[in-house]
Image: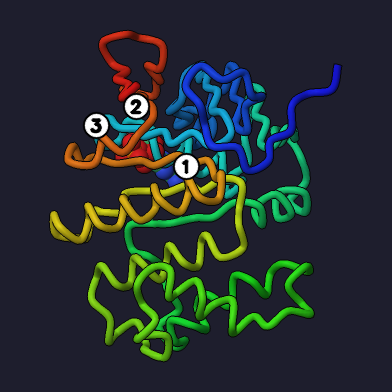
Amino acid sequence: MLPEPLSANSYQPGSNLEPVIFVSNLNHYFGVGGLRKQVLFDINLEIKAGEIVIMTGPSGSGKTTLLTLLGGLRSAQEGSLKILRQQICGVSKRKLTRLRRQIGYIFQAHNLMTFLTAKENVRMSLELHDEYINQDMDAKAIAMLETVGLGERVNYYPENLSGGQKQRVAIARALVSHPKIVLADEPTAALDKKSGRDVVELMQKLAKEQGCTILLVTHDNRILDIADRIIYMEDGILKNDSADMITSRH
Ligand code: ADP
């Protein structure tokens, strides 16, 4: 029997969709020789298409390390890691680069190019994708900025935008190419309560509209309720099957 497609289905609790993120027995180490230190221990995780998952836990517990492995920003060393059905443990840098184009990234510091306008920052993401070459990328970038409420600010440089507005540009940049997966690391950390809430609600809305899967790392207890599922990392151990650690809105 053919597997079910991973297309724009919004996540339904209890659905049997094949996971878009599949991690099995993943270990990770930093350093070499006597200084080698294990930071992730036997991680097992499945995230289904359209699911919004929040990973929380103390600082230094390994959340960012796991996120960077899932995003192909760091090479996985031990275990099995499949993204969009593709095994990425031990694959070449070239394959990782190709995979990265299917993932949107949103970071705490938004990482916008300071010398580019909001529109140019969003457009840059489209330029990485061959399928947009013959399309009006400026129009697409502007439309996406309008969607995130920045239609009036398309020609502003980051220095002239507030923290919340910069994070909205980062969201527009991450989602404009309709990635299957968005990985977000502390996207609200630099924002006040109201802006932080607005930003994650916007991410949630767009992800549900696009059928995109989100894995979001946060310390921010005020945004946990946007998740379909919450997982907890402690000392490099992921507690994603413990009833008292997982809360579900459904
Ligand atoms: P979190 O995101 O939960 O704060 P991290 O994934 O950043 O945790 O860090 C997990 C552990 O790995 C910490 O002990 C941290 O010091 C260590 N670590 C993270 N990045 C590196 C690195 N590049 N080199 C060595 N150790 C690192």
Residue 147 x %, y %:
43, 69
Characterize the local packing of mark 1: few (<14), some (14-19) or many (20 or more) Cα atoms within 10 angstroms: many
- For marks 3 and 2, give the CA distance: 14 Å
Residue occupying image coordinates x 66% and y 36% = 83
Amino acid type, callout 1: Ile
Q: Which residue is mark 3?
A: 58
Mark 3 / mark 2, whichever is N-terminal: 3
Ligand 1 within 8 Å, label 3 CB: yes
Look at the numbered disc 1 and give the secondary structure of its residue: strand
- For marks 1 and 2, give the CA distance: 12 Å
- Quadrant placement of the C terminus: top left
Residue 184 x %, y %:
42, 49
Quarter residue 163 falls in:
bottom left
Q: Decide if residue 250 is on the left or right side of residue 188.
A: right
Q: Which residue is mark 2?
A: 230
Mark 3 / mark 1, whichever is N-terminal: 3
Look at the numbered disc 2 and give the secondary structure of its residue: strand
Residue occupying image coordinates x 47% and y 45% = 208
Of the numbered discs in the image, which one, if any, rests on residue 146? none
Q: Which residue is mark 1?
A: 214
